[in-house]
Amino acid sequence: MKERQEVIDFCLEFPHSFEDYPFDDLNWTVMRRKDTKKGFAWIFEREGKIWVNVKVKPDWAIFWRDNYKSVIPAYHMNKTHWNSVILDGTVPDSEIKMMISESFELCGKK
């Protein structure tokens, strides 16, 4: 995964998910759950690459960061509960999809 549309298309596979552009800046795409209205994937371009912010359990946040240099504390989000994944081709698609899936679950109803 390297393209914004690839991430959007994957996120739209989740039930009751939708694409949102809540800011005046169209660079930011937020994928939300219809049931909670919470954003589970924040997609944006920065430094010439597509980035995706995903919610993670704090212990897993560190795991992902330690294993991939392109997974870092989230840009513009809580650094304990969110990671940024830089889509530069170094993180396998299966791992990116796993992180997005977990984020979708974590942003659901409690």
Image (spheres, helix red, strand yellow):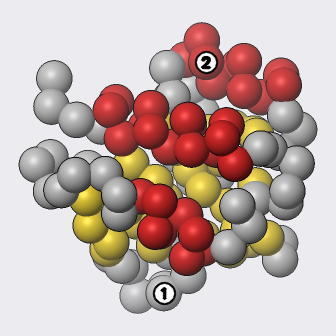
Q: Disc 1 on helix, strand or loop?
A: loop
* Amino acid type, callout 2: Trp
From the viewer's perspective, is 108 left or right of 82? left
Query: Measured from the top left, where is residue 51 in percent x and y?
Result: 67, 61
Q: Quadrant of residue 45?
A: bottom right
Q: In which quarter of the image is residue 37?
A: bottom left
Residue neighbourhood size for the residue with mark 1, other residues' Cα within 10 Å, grouped as few (<14), some (14–19), many (≥20): few
Where 26 sits versus 105, above or below?
A: below
From the viewer's perspective, is 10 left or right of 95? left
Q: Disc 2 on helix, strand or loop?
A: helix
Label 2 vs label 1: CA separation? 30 Å
- The residue lying toward the viewer, choosing from 63 and 90, is 90
- The residue lying toward the viewer, choosing from 35 and 79, is 35
- Residue 37 can be seen in this image: no
* Amino acid type, callout 1: Leu
From the viewer's perspective, is 34 left or right of 73? left
Q: Residue at x 10, y 49 (%)?
A: 35
Query: What residue is disc 2 on?
Result: 60
Q: Quadrant of residue 88?
A: bottom right
- The residue lying toward the viewer, choosing from 103 and 96, is 96
- The residue lying toward the viewer, choosing from 82 and 17, is 17
Query: Measured from the top left, where is residue 57 in percent x and y?
Result: 49, 20
Q: Residue at x 16, y 23 (%)?
A: 110
Residue neighbourhood size for the residue with mark 2, other residues' Cα within 10 Å, grouped as few (<14), some (14–19), many (≥20): some
Q: Which residue is drawn at 79% across and 70% down?
A: 49
Q: Quadrant of the N terminus?
A: bottom right
Q: Which numbered disc, 2 or 1, marks the residue closer to the eye?
A: 2
Query: What residue is disc 1 on?
Result: 26
